Amino acid sequence: MNRSAPVLEVSLSGTLGAFTLDLGFTTPAAGITALFGPSGAGKSTVLRCIAGLSRQAGGRVIFSGERWLDGDVFVPAYRRPIGYVFQDAGLFAHLTVAENLRFGLKRAAAARPVIGFDDVVERLSLEALLQRSPDGLSGGERQRVAIGRALLVQPRLLLVDEPLSAVDLPARDTIVTLIETLCRDLVIPAIYVTHDLAEMTRLANHLVLIDAGKLVAAGPLDRVLTDLSLPLATQAEAGVVLDGVVEAIDHQFGLTHYRAGGALLMAPSRGLTVGSRCRLRVLASDVSLCHEPPQGTTILNVLPGVILSADSFDGMQTTILLQLGHADEGVRLLARVTRKSWEGLGFAPGQKVHALVKGVSLLHGLAAG
Amino acid sequence: MAGIIMTTVELAAVTSAILLLIATPLGWWLARSRHWLAEVVGAIALLPLVLPPTVLGFYLLIALGPEGPLALLLGFFGLHTLAFTFSGLVVGSVIYSLPFALQPIRARFEAIGQRPLDAAASLRASPLDAFCSVVVPLARPALLSAALLTFAHTVGEFGVVLMIGGSIPGRTQVLSTSIFEAIEAGDTHTAQQLAAGMLLFSLLAILGIRLLDRRFSRLPV
């Protein structure tokens, strides 16, 4: 299977209450696609249409060659090989946790087993909850059960609708990590609806941006994040994510050395081992530019690169797209400087510069393997 | 006396059973349909609440009688008339108690909402499977309380059973009508006993329904 080939083809149109839905996109056969946009953009509606829970929009939904929606063809939700994690978990109140988990397992088509009951219980730490009623569970516990229940139906596509809205802060990280590792290990493509930039940058491999029922942009995460023509690039939180590995650990200063494509970055952090895979985030506002390598700077990460393009906005600021290392290794950064600096210091596309990276945040690290 | 109680209990039990079978799908449809027809049917189903029992009984008597519009249909089943028969009482009671079975069931179905159905569909449950394995269990307290309410209400009905049944001893005489007849015959002692028994029964029935509601009022998460 070609992991980047589209597996899901969606094109929907229809009037739904207050707004008109009219968009189309494809998602790859592997990884997590974030369906990202402001509240009320129609994200959940799109997800419901993909699932077959809503028939309000017409168009096409084709999964792996199977026509789920196409003209008069409509495959009802219960015949689509999906798993669905609802915003509010949607557990059955009249069943125990174990019975909730088995509800889908009993009805699953056994053609392609994804995961077994015991495995779900272990990986989602559900052992202690099995005999309990959903009533007494916390938001985080409920979502863990909901994820397990959705996986036990042995889906070929996982649909996740803002699963963190009813989960308290400390538990959110656990939920996100679980979704991430389970989708990767079980090789199930997922579509994850969120309006939260931090959640999106942490999880997504692929991004579909929508607003007011229309498509804004779609593509691999790094491509969309570094597209200066999109409104994302002008936001205060504009930045890039870099997927890399831990190359070395400097125990003397507590610094971790990360390699992402052609770039080597250092940042203080603990708990990772050499070989761990990780995702880093570098905000545009944490990156400055210099013509010459600076002397005596406190900034650890000074990386040579080339200016690819730039976009000045609101009359005051400029966002700059940089290529680090060789073009084929494809590490790109965004830098945010004042328009005064951009114009005053004579920077221009094609020019060689040095990027000063003040901040690198570790979005997540996963053990080697 | 034992015969009268038997007739009463049998009538109430049969009515409750039939009404559960009618009110469950009807309540489901009324709770979920946005069709204007659902509003009309919903209103008609509530009519027995406000209609004088004598009016209802009068129309039923005509409809079920030998000259009634249903005579042809009845003839098909080899029956001449349902007026003044136990079956006629059942038909009358089913119609008269319909709102009492329908209301709790419909309200519960509305409270359950769409989410459990969506969840069931995403877990490969067909609509019928979802109805049986999710909706009915979630609505069980409402079904119980509908059955109890119907039973109690049927035991307590008077006008309709008198109109349709005629209080024929051994066939259509039930407790409520026998109180009336005891008083007419000047038998205050029997009337008093029956009335006290009915009061106690009604109180227990209402208490039972309240307890059911308290015990099961939690909504699905």
Image: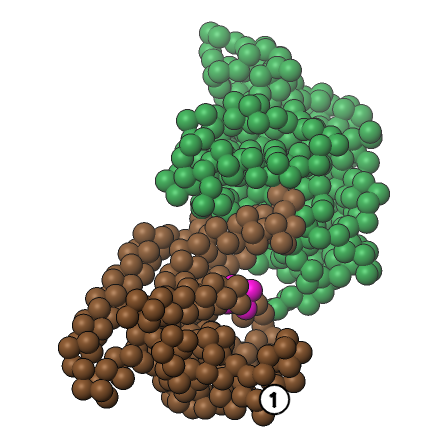
Chain colours: A green, B brown
Let me know if residue B200 appears in the view. yes
Question: Which residue: 41% across, 76% down?
Answer: B171
Residue A219 image point, x, y percent: 74, 42
Determine if the magenta segment contains residue A101.
Answer: no
Which element carries disc 1, helix, strand or loop? Answer: loop
What is the quadrant of the C terminus of chain A in the image? top right
Q: Is residue A223 above or below residue B49?
A: above
Q: Is residue A267 above or below residue A25?
A: above
Let me know if residue A292 appears in the view. no
Label 1, on which residue?
A: B69
Front-most of residues B31 and A135: B31
Question: Which residue: 59% across, 79% down?
Answer: B79
The majority secondary structure of the magenta stretch comes to helix
Question: Residue A108 sits in which quadrant?
Answer: top right
What is the quadrant of the N terminus of chain A in the image? top right
Residue A204 image point, x, y percent: 64, 36
Residue A35 image point, x, y percent: 64, 46
Front-most of residues A348 and A11: A11
Q: Is residue A233 above or below residue A73?
A: above
Front-most of residues B56 and A233: B56
Question: Which residue: 51% across, 39% down?
Answer: A100
Q: Mark 1 lies on which chain?
A: B
Residue B85 image point, x, y percent: 47, 79
Start-end of magenta stretch? B23-28
Front-most of residues B18 and B39: B18
Question: Which residue: 24% across, 70% down?
Answer: B198
Horizontal relation, residue A249 to residue B7: left or right: right
Q: How dense is the environment of label 1, judged by Cα within 10 Å: few (below 14), some, or many (20 and up)?
A: few
Task: Farthest residue to the top: give it.
Answer: A252
Question: Residue A18 sits in which quadrant?
Answer: bottom right
How many marks on residues?
1
Horizontal relation, residue B103 to residue A150: left or right: left
